[in-house]
Amino acid sequence: MPGNSNIIKDKLKFNYELWLQPSIININNFRGHIESSFEFPLNKNFSLLSSINYTYESIVLNNVKQNDFIFLLGLSIN
């Protein structure tokens, strides 16, 4: 389920993507993903970008984490 919106007209943009993928065989086996970002245009060529990504898997191999969390802060070239 992707989407986006302008929080402050042409000054602050919010983007997101959310999905859940269940197993057909086992309802307790699923993975999910959330990605969201804020974009603040500095001028017509550059934007300040902040992003959060979170992924979860209910069943994983040994020595593999069930969830990942990533926070990014950067500059975007338009």
Image (cartoon, rainbow, N blue to C red):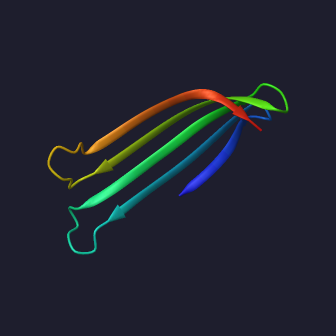
Provide residue 4's location: percent of width, then percent of height: 65, 47
Q: Residue at x 14, y 49 (%)?
A: 62
Using the image as rendered, state which of residue 3 and residue 65 is in the foreground.
65
**Quarter-of-image position of residue 13:** top right
- 1 vs 3, left or right, is left
Q: Residue at x 69, y 33 (%)?
A: 76
Q: Seen from this angle, which residue lies furthest front?
A: 63
Q: Residue at x 23, y 53 (%)?
A: 58
- 66 vs 49, left or right, is left
Q: Which quarter shows the C terminus?
A: top right
Q: How many numbered tags mark residues here?
A: 0
Provide residue 69's location: percent of width, then percent of height: 38, 36
- In the image, residue 55 sits, relative to residue 50, either above or below, namely below
Provide residue 26's location: percent of width, then percent of height: 20, 69
**Quarter-of-image position of residue 65:** top left
Using the image as rendered, state which of residue 7 and residue 62 is in the foreground.
62
Q: Seen from this angle, which residue lies furthest right?
A: 44
- 58 vs 5, left or right, is left
- In the image, residue 39 sits, relative to residue 67, either above or below, namely above
Q: Residue at x 56, y 46 (%)?
A: 16
Q: Seen from this angle, which residue lies furthest bottom?
A: 25
- 56 vs 75, left or right, is left
Using the image as rendered, state which of residue 6 and residue 45 is in the foreground.
45
- In the image, residue 33 sits, relative to residue 77, either above or below, namely below
